[in-house]
């Protein structure tokens, strides 16, 4: 929650585009969620994709991958 408030306030003040703020949020939230789920210690279940990784960690990895892919794609189109 603190991450989203900080990105929203500072992004508006510094005139950072909304799409850039969303990409930063996806990556930051995904990394934070992955670490929190890693430290939890309780059994949250597993998926067959990657053993010993909880479903919440799978979602966190998807957020990081989506944010990073969006970022790389935006960098490629800026150079054109």
Image (tube, grey):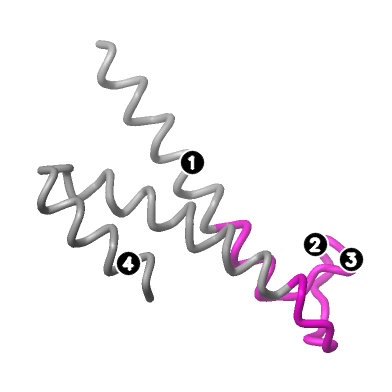
The x and y percentages for residue 54 are 76, 74
Task: Work out whether mark 1 precedes mark 3 in sequence or the reverse, and give the earlier one.
Answer: 3
Residue 16 bears which disc, if any? none
The x and y percentages for residue 71 are 39, 36
Alpha-carbon distance for marks 4 and 1? 17 Å
Tell me whether the residue at label 3 lies in contact with that at label 4, contact meaning CB atoms closer than 8 angstroms.
no
**Quarter placement of the N terminus:** bottom left
**Nearer mark to the viewer, of 4 and 1:** 4
Alpha-carbon distance for marks 2 and 3? 7 Å
Whether residue 24 sits left or right of residue 5 in the image: it is right
Q: Residues within 10 Å of mark 3 (few under 14, many from 20)?
A: few
**Nearer mark to the viewer, of 3 and 4:** 4
Residue for badge 3 = 51
Q: Residue at x 13, y 44 (%)?
A: 14
Residue for badge 2 = 49
Whether residue 36 sits left or right of residue 78 in the image: it is right
Alpha-carbon distance for marks 4 and 2? 29 Å
**Nearer mark to the viewer, of 1 and 3:** 1
Residue 4 bears which disc, if any? 4
Residue 18, placed above or below residue 54 = above
Alpha-carbon distance for marks 3 and 4? 31 Å
Comparing 47 with 64, the one in front is: 64
- Seen as rendered, the residue at the extreme right is 51
Q: Give the range drawn in magenta.
A: 38-62
Q: Which residue is drawn at 25% across and 11% down?
A: 80
**Nearer mark to the viewer, of 2 and 3:** 3
Task: Work out whether mark 2 precedes mark 1 in sequence or the reverse, and give the earlier one.
Answer: 2
């Amino acid at each position: 929650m603190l991450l989203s408030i900080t990105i929203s306030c500072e992004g508006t003040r510094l005139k950072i585009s909304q799409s850039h703020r969303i990409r930063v949020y996806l990556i930051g939230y995904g990394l934070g969620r992955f670490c929190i789920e890693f430290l939890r210690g309780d059994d949250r279940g597993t998926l067959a994709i990657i053993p010993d990784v909880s479903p919440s960690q799978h979602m966190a990895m998807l957020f990081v991958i989506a944010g990073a892919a969006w970022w790389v794609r935006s960098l490629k189109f800026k150079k054109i």
